Amino acid sequence: MSDKYVEMLRSRGYRITPQREMIIEELAKTNAHMAAEEIHDSLKSRTKSLNIATIYRTLEMLVEEGLACRNDLGGGCVVYAITRHGPHIHLVCRLCGQVIEADYELLTDLGYKLKQEYGFEADLRHISLFGICSKCQREQEETRS
């Protein structure tokens, strides 16, 4: 899978260094979201010539080229995923930090209304919504009682 992304980037004029290739491979092999630091930790045993700045630049390049997405899960945690991960919503609990993946189709009407009423085409394929999960809501209610 990573070969496909590497070839796409080459065809767009990017120079693919061994470090970039390792970063792309690491992100592409997982179906999960990864922080730059997680990628660095995973790859540091394979090479000494990889620094965190290179990882961030490579991840941003992938986002700019539409091959990956960036998402803020709160608390300073920014994660990345290859676009084949598919569109979805992250529901992030402000209290416990739990992240629940929700169906992105729930946002179809919102996207349509934003386009119609504001002429704004929102990228809703991979977003985070912050709130309070059901467990924390129950705990809050019990505390109030």
Image: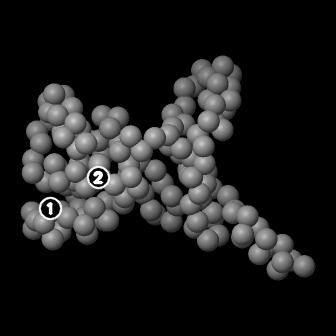
Does residue 82 appear in this view? yes
Q: Amino acid at mark 1?
A: Leu
- At 29% from the left and 49% from the top, the residue drawn is 28
Pointer 2 local density, CA inside 10 Å: few below 14, some 14–19, many at least 20: few
Q: Please name the residue that numbered disc 2 is placed on.
A: 29
Where's residue 48, x and y in %? 9, 68
94 above or below 9?
A: below
Q: Amino acid at mark 2?
A: Lys
8 and 50: which one is in front? 8
Q: Quadrant of residue 134?
A: bottom right
Q: Quadrant of residue 15?
A: top left
Where the N terminus falls, by quadrant?
A: top left
Q: Is residue 24 left or right of residue 135?
A: left
- At 30% from the left and 45% from the top, the residue drawn is 60
Q: Determine the CA span between mark 2 and mark 1.
A: 19 Å
Q: Nearer the viewer, mark 2 or mark 1?
A: 2
Label drawn at residue 134: none
Where's residue 36, x and y in %? 31, 60
Where's residue 123, x and y in %? 51, 34
Q: Is residue 20 left or right of residue 33?
A: left
Q: Please name the residue that numbered disc 1 is placed on.
A: 50
Does residue 9 appear in this view? no
74 above or below 63?
A: below
Q: How many marks?
A: 2
Say how the picture is coloured.
one colour
Where's residue 58, x and y in %? 23, 48
Q: Give the residue at the far right of this rendering.
A: 145
Where the C terminus falls, by quadrant?
A: bottom right
Q: Is residue 75 left or right of residue 144?
A: left
